[in-house]
Image (tube, rainbow, N blue to C red):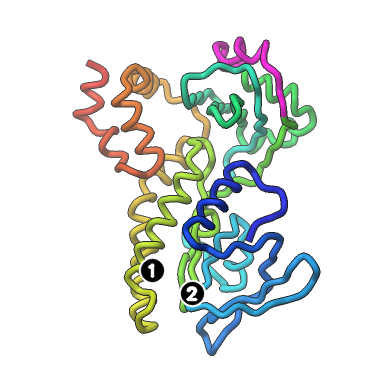
Amino acid sequence: MFSPRRTVLDQLLVEAARDAGADMHDAVTFRELLLDGDRVVGAQLQGCNGTTTECRAALVVGADGIWSAVARAASAATDIQYPSLTCGYYAYWSGVPTNGVEFYIRDGRDILVFPTHDGLTCIWAGRSRKDWETYRKNVEHSYHDVIAAAPCLAERLADAERVTPFRGTSKLPNFYRRSFGVGWALVGDAAYHRDPIAGMGIGDAFVGAQCLADALAEGLGRDAETLDTALLGYQEAFRDRTMPIFSYTVKAASLKEQASAMPIYARIAQSEQDTVQFMDVLAGNTPAKNVFNPENIARLLA
């Protein structure tokens, strides 16, 4: 289910799903789960014209974001939770040269820079959550105040053009929800969310989608008990993949500049191989201990 306003990424994902054989419907809203006893057997959906439809399914998957209506309907408990630690605004800019993704963490500030489509660069400027009310009172001034903490970026931005409005939020919780039950599952931000400081939200979504797909390949088309066991395996596999980087992210989102770590990050940035490995850690593709272990740190600082 997708809203009428799609991002470029949304459109790419929709097209890929259709090419893979999925039946996609626009402007459809989830209303409630259909139950047979305690097992979910489908969902009631409402179209933009107000008509409702009941769709039966062996499994209902909620991929509907942080405030998931499917999670509420299934009474999915939040197992692990930390409050929002940061806030901020982002905008798309033209004329900001960058060779790739850039991260800046300063005391009380975080900046994320990454190239996107059509030659545009997305720049997020974050502050500690306690600064939200001050930030939103004068967004443009506060945004550039954050950028000023990274002079090399501020210089590039001076001659750039902002091509979108500022968009921001202070609602960036860090949590794991129970992500499966009898006849239902959650994936993406509906199941798990961490602060966007590392810029890896879409990576987390793909990791979760793959773990769920693996479970469905094992459990769908068999008896209910086999499917339920496979979904339990999905939750365990996903948490095994993401828990170390979740802990790292919560710590980083405190926005306390770690002077002792700066030389390590500087050396990582000088090596393409080390940078790729570090990005794999942020994406949850490789364990954090592969980078942050005594032997590797000694090598980086040698």
Query: Residue 260 in the image: x percent, y percent?
Result: 37, 22
Between discs 2 and 1, the one toward the N terminus: 2
Above or below, 60 against 120 in this view is below
Query: Residue 44 in the image: x percent, y percent?
Result: 66, 76
| Three-letter amino acid code at the position of disc 2 | Leu
Task: Bin the neighbour count of mark 1 within 10 Å (Cα to Cα): few under 14, some 14-19, many 20 and up.
Answer: some
Q: Tell me: 84 left or right of 292.
A: right
Above or below, 110 against 156 in this view is below
* Segment colored magenta: 148-163
Name the residue located 72 percent from the left edge and 71 percent from the top edge. Answer: 46
Name the residue located 54 percent from the left edge and 50 percent from the top edge. Answer: 13
58 in the magenta segment:
no
Query: Residue 161 in the image: x percent, y percent?
Result: 70, 19
Q: Number of labelled discs? A: 2
Q: Secondary structure at mark 1?
A: helix
List the residue tagged with mark 1: 216
List the residue tagged with mark 2: 59
Q: Are marks 2 and 1 in contact (CB under 8 Å)?
A: yes
Name the residue located 54 percent from the left edge and 88 percent from the top edge. Answer: 36
Separation of marks 2 and 1 at Cα, in angstroms: 9 Å
Query: Residue 296 in the image: x percent, y percent?
Result: 22, 28
Q: Tell me: 240 left or right of 172.
A: left
Above or below, 48 against 241 in this view is below
154 in the magenta segment:
yes
Determine the image quadrant of residue 115: top right
